[in-house]
Image (cartoon, rainbow, N blue to C red):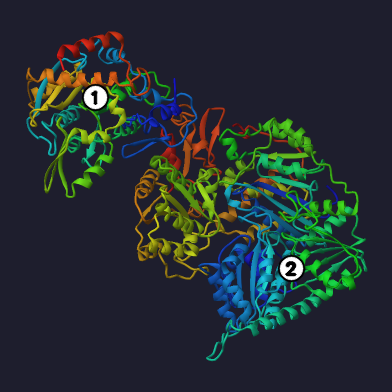
Amino acid sequence: MGAFHEPLNIIVTGVGGQGNVLASQVISVAAVEAGYRVAVGETFGVSQRGGSVMSHVRISHDRPYGPLIPRGRAHVIAGFEPVETVRVMLDYANPDTVIIMNNRPNYPLGCLLGEDKYPQPQKILAAVQKMAGRVHVLPATELAKEAGSPMAANMVMTGALAGSGLLPFGREYFVETIKSLFKDHIRELNLKAFTFGLEHIGSNVAWRVSYNENFAGNL
Amino acid sequence: MPGQKDLKNDVLDQDLCSACGMCVGLCPYIKTARDRVRVIYPCGLAEGTCYSICPKTGVDVRAMDLAVFGREREDQALGVMQGIYIARAVQDRASGAQYGGVASALAALALEQGMVSAMVLTGGDVLNPYPVLARSADEARACAGSKYTGVPTLEILNRAIREGLDHPGVVGRPCQVLAARKAEHSPLPGTQFNQAGSFGLVLGLFCFWALDPKFYQFLTNKVKDKIIKMDIPVEGPVIEAESGTYRWQVEDLRPYIKKSCNLCLDSTSEWADIAVGSTEYDPAWNTVLARSDKGRELLDLALRLNVLEVGEYPAERFPLLRRAALNKKMRVLKMQEYQPGRPGCPVVPPEYQKQLEEQWGGIGQ
Amino acid sequence: MTIMGVCCDKPGVKVALTGNESIARGALEAGVGYASSYPGSPTAEVLGTLAKLARQFNLYAEWSINEKVAMEVAAAASFTGLRSLVIMKADGLNVALDFASALAISGCRGGMVIVVGDDPGAHSSVREEDSRNLCKALHLPVLEPASVQEAKDVTREAFSLSESLQLPVVVRCVTRVCHASGDVLLGELAPAGRRPAFNQGDRVITFSIKLHALQEQKLARASDWAGNSRLNSYHGPGDAGRLVIASGPCYMYALEALEMLGLSEQVGVLKLGVTWPLPEKLLLSYLKTAAEVVFAEEVEPFVEDNVMALAARHWDEVGKIKFYGKRNGQVAGPNGPGIGELDPDVLAQSLSAIWGTPYTKPALPAHQEIFDLLGTKMPDRELALCAGCPHRASFWSIRTALELDGRGGIVLGDIGCYTLGIARTGYYLLQTMHCMGAGVGIASGLGKLDCFGFDKPVITVVGDSTFYHAALPALVNARYHRASFMCVVLDNETTAMTGHQPHPGRETTATGEPADTVPMEEIIRGIGIPYAVQDPYDVEAAIEAVYRMLQQQGPRVLILRRACALAAVKGKQKNRVYVDPEKCIGDSCGCSRFCSKVFACPANIWDAESGKARIDEAVCNGCGVCATLCPQQAIVVERTV
């Protein structure tokens, strides 16, 4: 990606408790450190209670923007959860939107109860690919477990975003931000998880789909 | 095979539950408080162990005789038995024991002999009874004394089986004995009982009916001081309190008798290994019915080890006991509510029914 | 986004802050000396931020017992000449209203700012109350920031306005400002603070009709001030015939919507940073050239109504104007005019319809086509109590005890995490839900209906923080009148919903100082109500406790106490919980998937392939309650020491 969009519209989405709000904060602090203007709108409501959570992050050079991205105008969607990714795409994606998606489902209650069906992984992938040209699926939760805790999936996703080449500033701003926001073993865990995400996506983004068996999407 | 919904509709909501406790704790959906048994959440399954195990659903008296003893009964009054005796505990008669203390002594003996790994009993006192899983003879003796309300003690049996307890024993009312036998012999949809094996001992109690705990409200309204002991002989309840003795008529009890007990045919725990009750004439002794080989052996052992003193059942009392048992059966069979095969109503096959009427007629009213 | 940003002493530098942090920074730049609040979304983090900086900036910060007390303690500081800040959500202003209306008459001394967080769309509230209408009734000026940057600037400005008027000033912030974040250009931090003074003879009294007149004079001065304030601004062509009047973040939406429509050069946008009293002269100057005016504001048509009234009063000066807004239904989101939030899309659509300007939206994915690809509709994601939440165990116990009791007992509730008792994971138990502490009062009322033959047992649930906030008067009332009901305090040892703030039952204060704890047991004992305490994680014992107490008469309290699962595991190694597939019997008789289907903890999931339950280790908080409820004992808890 040569020129960057102005503003660059990123949506970070997932389920309450997955740490997506923290991820969007890391992105915006890094952006401001890199000299950009940023507006973040969080739609979390009673965030810790398992609802859908969506953060709009808008990065621009000079002009300030409002905290909400208009429909169909997301440039990047970082989906921490497959169905939430689809949900956000329905309203905000366009054929040029780039998708970075964690493959780990978080089942809504209705699915656990058998009232709703959680779509099959292959079908989710087909739907995502139908809506967007470039899709990168990664096992963020599994990578986070490797880094030390499944809770660090948010930093794996942040790393993947930082390594995607889609942002107008480098990973060093993220590293500094993580160092400044966390301390002790959480800092180490988050840096490790961030690096795993970064490495997974590769420095020169070879857009590929890694849909591995870890996508335990059966209900 | 029906399930939880039917149990609720057919038994619990019809007030036909005798609070045996067998369905409680099979699953997270059936719970108990005091003598109440309630479905607290619909499990959604069409078929359930809870229904097939319930003593108030689907019992054919003859089929159960065959399943438990391998033969039909000759005596329609008292069921299959090998012998009837009077007995009393020789030593260590448990304090608080009703009559001859035989039930406690046999339960303790079965535990001491390793015949059972644990014994399900009703502990506490008359006003506050609760289930006990006794693992030692002393724990069993501590449960001595009659309780007159339905206590869902088999709940604890389920817990014990789940915890991997092998060959547990049960001391229970006729409905609880039946529940245990159904658990042994029914094809059940759940898996709980597949590893359970048979029960080490099923010791049945005589029971003509159980009372609703509301009876105790009646009691505490009438008797203001501490109740020391309670007995309900045929004439009616006798309460010993600190201030003296109180007596009522059986009729005073009627409003507090559980509806399900009015439809019950079994007053002597007909499918127990051994059944124990009062003599109705000598409070120092119990009536004992040895039914199965296992029950017979236990009684022999108790005699050999000098745990029980056993005597011949007085010939002149025998017809009285039989008449009491037959009267109850005939009363049930003539009730309008009694519809064989309906929940709460055991099925008496025609040949049994015929004998029953003959024997009842033979005894005279 | 960091506390370092809020206290950064580098004027002219840009830092990333949340809206709430920006408000805190604005207060620090204004030299705030005293801050108080009761936690409520969307403004809960303002006081938390200031509390962390209290020592460094020599300011006092407290989580007060409720909003009325918070406003009183802040007013006290203002009476001594300190600058004080009180923060609450819209619902909190209702609680504080009695004092606020008196304070608005007596006035204040040191600058006093009331930050009120409104929640258009009711993201984290039970209603989307527009507090501007109350503020108008209170005769208090209202300032509205449009962005994270303005949250700071407006707060700082509000202090000086308040001090010059000797009147508290309201900063009305909406969720899209409080919960937004962005780059903030820092200003100077105020120099070291003032010293409080309140001497014999000083009087701050709400009395006499003369003060009402003074109040009106203050508002007139505020209106004059507003006309020259930088908080109002205009963007667009001179002498615009088409004008959008916007307030709050709707200003940003309006700019973007006009851009999307290609109308930026033709339509003027007047941003009102002061929405009460209206900057009348300023408004009139724009109304005179405008022929068409569109209002963009949330939630109620507040500016709209008042500007139309202004125009009516000055009809001879402003001439004929066509007004578009919520009153004529032209500015409306998907739920209708005056309901829910606005956003750039809603405004673009509204403006497009008003002015006939075609709006080409980006082509969104064809939803039906996607559903077909998915093979199902999108599964909804309803709100749920967190994994391991002690309230779930409590609600299960209450539900079970009520079923056992069989008398059709009813359950009341109010505001807190336990509000989710209205939904699936609270087994739909709650039958009334209104405001903080209301459940106890309603229970007290139902508990006196026995004389009319109402004999259902009544249970009301109340959180620990709510207990202190609003339950006490109702409990005293119940004891005094012998009202018969059972109050279950769902005590998770924190104010969990808003982010784990302390309350009088805790050992420390907002600033981490040791506190003189006020145990609720002592209060209940003092009122003379029988009570019991039980751990809800011991579900069997909790069922027994609820059942036992249900059989009693008169008021009684059961405290179900267990720390919030999120707070309990914070920074700690969680217990590992897993399912032994050998023991799990899946959906056959004996449990029929109780853990995932009925108990409904989001960590209890279902593996359709194996037909066995599973624990989602990314979600599980390790409480182990499901292990005690599984009838097969198939769930294993590996406890970390």
Chain at numbered mark 1: B
Label for residue C73?
A: none
Give the image location of residue C85, x and y in percent.
Answer: 61, 73
In the picture shown, does residue C190 fall above or below C368? below
The amino acid type, in three-letter code, at marker 2 is Glu
Q: Which of C338 and A49 is in front in this view?
A: C338
The amino acid type, in three-letter code, at marker 1 is Val
Give the image location of residue C263, x and y in percent.
Answer: 90, 57
Q: Is disc 2 surrounded by few (<14), some (14 to 19) or many (20+) residues within 10 Å?
A: many
Secondary element under disc 2, as helix, strand or loop, is helix
**Location of residue B38 (image quadrant):** top left
- Picture residue at 53% right of the left edge, 28% below the top: C611
Secondary element under disc 1, as helix, strand or loop, is strand
In the picture shown, does residue B110 fall above or below C159? above
**Location of residue B227 (image quadrant):** top left
Answer with left or right where residue C517 lies relative to residue C218.
left
Q: Nearer the viewer, residue B97 or C55?
A: B97
- Asked if one can make out residue C553 in the rendered structure from this viewpoint, the answer is yes
Label for residue C150?
A: 2
- Picture residue at 49% right of the left edge, 32% below the top: C593
Q: Nearer the viewer, residue C10 or B253?
A: B253
In the picture shown, does residue C510 fall above or below C579? below
Q: Which of C197 and C395 is in front in this view?
A: C395
Q: Is disc 1 surrounded by few (<14), some (14 to 19) or many (20+) residues within 10 Å?
A: many
Which residue is identified by label 1? Answer: B202
Give the image location of residue C180, x and y in percent.
Answer: 70, 59
In the picture shown, does residue A174 fall above or below C51? above
